[in-house]
Structures are given as C-alpha cells and as structure tokens.
Amino acid sequence: MILYLDTSALVKRYFRESYSDEILSGWKAAAQIITSFVAYAETMASIYRKKREAGFDDLLIREIAGSFRRDWESFIRVEVNEELSEYIDRVVEEYPLRGFDAIHLASALAIHKVFPDDFVFACFDDRLARAAESEGLQVMGK
C-alpha cells in the first residue's frame, strides 16, 4: 500500500489521539509513506503548539520532534512547484479547501496518477476527506 498522510494524519503518529491506532496500522502496512513538503512546517508547528497548549515537557517535545525529523527522511515528499499548480488550480476551483489542504489533495492526486493501485489518502479533516473521496481516492480518516 502507498499511504499519503496529510498533517492531521501525520500528527497522530506522534501524539495519542483518536484514530492514532489506525494511522499506526496503516504506517506498518505501507510500502511507502508520502506527504507534501508543507507537512514539515505544519507538523513542527503542531508539535510546538501542543507543547504550549497542553504543557508538555521540553524533553518530551524534543524527543517527539526528533522522531518526526528521523521519519521525515524516509518519506517521499511531494514538492510544491509549477507541475503541481495545475492540480492546485483544479481542486481550489472545485472544493472549498484551505491552502495547505489544497496542496495536500493536489499532491495526493499527482502521486495517485502515477501509483493508482493500493493508494490510501489519510486525513482527518471532513472537508478535505469529502473532496478526496469526490476525486476517487480511498480515504482513511474522518
């Protein structure tokens, strides 16, 4: 299986949340993990936002951030570039998505075009999940 993780799904790997078990199972079953380059900034921001909001210990947050950075090196990362623009143009015209969500969906569609079999898009944003399903992607989440 090829597993595309948007940031809402990716964060569940590092913090115990609803559906973390599903993400961990999918992660273990995946031949490859894919995400967009924007997920780095989004995930790091989420890690440090959780620290501020939940009062997590500095050492724990450094360990989580380090684990994410190590995992990051193993991901296939989709670049936000001119080639992705045609996908972005189409999805923002069709669906009411926020900017980074449009980038994640466009990235997933570009990869799905190359690897159409056994491709799963994981996200936990209802609007993004509905758009992905409308595009014919198998969605894990919601």
Image: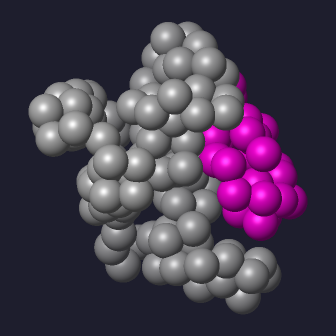
Q: Is residue 142 left or right of residue 71?
A: right
Q: Is residue 37 above or below residue 2?
A: below
Residue visible at 58% across and 34% down?
A: 17
- Residue 141: in magenta span: yes
Q: Position of residue 18 (x, y in %)?
A: 67, 33
Q: Position of residue 77 (x, y in %)?
A: 33, 47
Residue visible at 60% across and 79% down?
A: 98
- Residue 133: in magenta span: yes
Q: Is the image coloured rainbow, by chain, by secondary structure, or in one colour?
A: one colour
User: Which image quarter: residue 14?
Assistant: top left
- Seen from the viewer's position, the closer of residues 134 and 130 is 130
Quadrant assignment for the C terminus: top right
Residue visible at 66% across and 83% down?
A: 92
Q: Is residue 82 above or below residue 57?
A: below
Q: Position of residue 132 (x, y in %)?
A: 75, 56
Residue visible at 59% across and 84% down?
A: 89
The single residue placed furthest to the front in the displayed view is 55
**What is the span of residues highlighted in magenta in the rendered image?**
116-142
Q: Is residue 89 visible?
A: yes
- Seen from the viewer's position, the closer of residues 96 and 89 is 96
Q: Is residue 78 above or below residue 99?
A: above
Q: Position of residue 23 (x, y in %)?
A: 58, 26
Quadrant assignment for the N terminus: top right
Q: How many marks?
A: 0
Q: Is residue 3 left or right of residue 60?
A: right
- Seen from the viewer's position, the closer of residues 53 and 111 is 53
Q: Is residue 125 left or right of residue 54?
A: right
Q: Is residue 104 above or below residue 123?
A: below
